Image (spheres, rainbow, N blue to C red):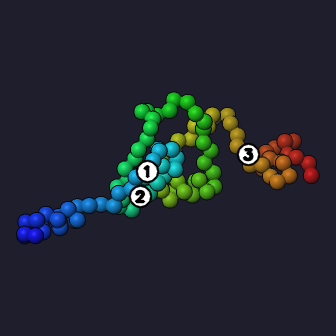
Amino acid sequence: MDIEEHAFRQEIRRSRRNRALIVGLGISGIATAVRLHAIGWEPVIVERSTGRRTGGYFIGVFGAGQAAARRLGILDAIPDRSPANSADYAVARNGGLIGAPERMQAQN
């Protein structure tokens, strides 16, 4: 191997980044891509869909989901699309609603 070829190979080694193939851009694909990018990897994403979905379901982000979004640095970017007059309640083991008015709580 001559000097030019050796220098070329060294340059290729220095310019390579770790790359990861991510199949699907659902919530887990997005989270994986964001985290890998944050630690210096180059995510390569393959998605079958040609565009963003126009329908679907809202996703409630609570507890562990909020903690994960905070660690990924995206929690503040997740919009709150709750209607202005809505209320959220947690359901207790006895079937009552935590934080609900007393008339709505289940009796033991």
Q: Viewer-nearest of labels 2 and 3?
A: 2
Within 10 Å of disc 2 (Cα), the crowding (few <14, some 14-19, many 20+) is some
- The numbered dot on residue 36 is 2
Does residue 73 appear anywhere in the picture? no
Residue 47 coordinates in the image, percent (x, y): 43, 41
Q: Residue at x 58, y 53 (%)?
A: 66
In the image shown, does 60 or 7 lie closer to the viewer?
A: 7
- Which type of secondary structure does the marked residue at label 3 adopt? loop
Residue 78 coordinates in the image, percent (x, y): 51, 45
Disc 3 from disc 1: Cα separation: 35 Å
Within 10 Å of disc 3 (Cα), the crowding (few <14, some 14-19, many 20+) is few
Displayed quadrant of residue 82 = top right
Q: Amino acid at mark 3?
A: Tyr
In the image shown, does 59 or 28 lie closer to the viewer?
A: 28
Disc 2 from disc 1: Cα separation: 10 Å
The disc, 2 or 3, on the residue closer to the chain's N-terminal end is 2
Q: Amino acid at mark 1?
A: Ile
Q: Residue at x 84, y 42 (%)?
A: 104
- The numbered dot on residue 22 is 1
Instruction: Answer left or right for 52 relative to 2.
Output: right
* In this view, 79 is above or below 50: below
Would you say the residues marked 2 and 1 are in contact, meaning their CB atoms lie under 8 Å apart? yes
Q: Which residue is mark 3?
A: 89
The disc, 2 or 1, on the residue closer to the chain's N-terminal end is 1
The disc, 3 or 1, on the residue closer to the chain's N-terminal end is 1
